Amino acid sequence: MTINTDALIIGAGPCGLFQVFELGLLGVKADVVDSLPGAGGQCTWLYPDKPIYDIPAVPICTGAELVANLMTQIEPFGPTFHLGEEVVGLQVVEGGFQVRTAPGKEFLAKTVFIAGGVGSFQPRKLHLEGAHALEDRYVHYRVQEPKIFKGQRLAILGGGDSALDWALALGPDAAAVTLIHRRDDYRAAPASVAQLKARAASGAVEIIESASATALRRDGERLTGIEVSLKDGTHRSVDADHILVFFGLSPKLGPIAEWGLTLNKKVIAVDTEAFQTNVPGIFAIGDICDYPGKKKLILSGFHEAALAAFAAKALIEPGKKVHLQYTTTSPLMHKRLGVAD
């Protein structure tokens, strides 16, 4: 089945979400694709608790709060999200662009907006012999069904928010939890660090710091544990039924590099009138686009989204004038926002 859409947005980070809003104000409904299993991009997956100070009229908010507010803001426009799906193919066809995702979903889009930050994010993998074969069964890079870890012995690798949050969340129902971190300082929220260390002091969890995983222990196709090397030269063997790896996410430009777009290193060249690429109908906003004077700021991406939306509307409805209307006074804007009397 082919999904027909006026606008396909690749990337569900803050700029991609605001692109939904700007298109919605102009009466354009969007589909949004992202390789990650949830919306928010870096703000959700890399620094959800990190304070942001440069969003206009918002003195301070966390990454998670910014994403939540953007999701609320776009509710009136009913975007359709396709999450956990990486775009792997794009070609120009009659009527727009044929876009394909890794699961095999196809879109026919009149316009395409690339808002993928610095590319699609992929989890940094555990590079130990046998890890790939155990992936999604005993070695995990995200938690999709927490209930499968109930009563299990868990080894959690990492020192960021995700590692500590899941150590705290899964700990009460697990048979045992061991957090293994390569340093003795953490990238997680201080409150989470304090809470985990309090649990460790009570014996509820074990923390192994300044350590790195060196090998997996297996019994046939089943994981039984992990070998760890400590900074002082000693070694530990940790019993584990599952390993949860939270080394963070790494950006990958991926198939975008093969779409015939003009690239400047790993970013896409655009004009500053419409933030359109060298391929008419394909726009790029946010950190992935490049032009003279470009600043990689969220607020810059919001501006880019607004101008790209006006240019796209003109392509979607050729020959029809696109009027600038204000949300403060326009009855049509109020109707689209769902605030009309």
Image: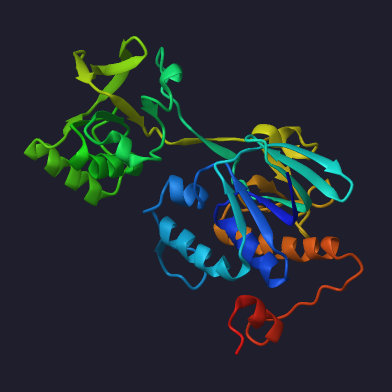
Which corner quadrant of the image does residue 53 belong to?
bottom left
Instruction: Indicate left or right for 68 with 313 as reference.
Output: left
Foreground of the two, 51 or 119: 119
Residue drawn where x is 67% and y is 68% of the image: 24
The residue sitting at the bottom extreme is 341
x and y, in percent, of residue 211 in the image: 26, 23
Q: Nearer the viewer, residue 184 or 261?
A: 261
Total marks in image: 0
- Quarter-of-image position of residue 210: top left
Residue extending farthest to the top is 220
Left or right for 328, reference 51? right
- Looking at the image, is 173 positioned above or below residue 222? below
* Looking at the image, residue 22 lies above or below residue 93: below
Q: Is residue 159 visible?
A: no
> Where the N terminus falls, by quadrant?
top right
Residue at figure coordinates x 46%, y 30% from the top left: 124
Residue 222 visible (yes or no):
yes
Residue 55: image location, x then y, percent? 50, 65
Which x, y percent locates residue 225? 26, 18
Left or right position of 148 against 330: left
Q: Residue furthest right?
A: 319
Residue in the picture at 65% in, 64% down:
303
Residue 335 at x, y percent in the picture: 66, 81
Looking at the picture, the colour scheme in use is: rainbow
Identify whether 280 is placed above or below 102: below
Residue at left offset 77%, top offset 36%: 259
Query: Of residues 163 and 274, which is closer to you in this image?
Result: 163
Tell me: residue 86, above or below residue 11.
above
**Can you name the residue that lies furthest to the left here?**
202
User: Which quarter of the rendering shows the C terminus?
Assistant: bottom right
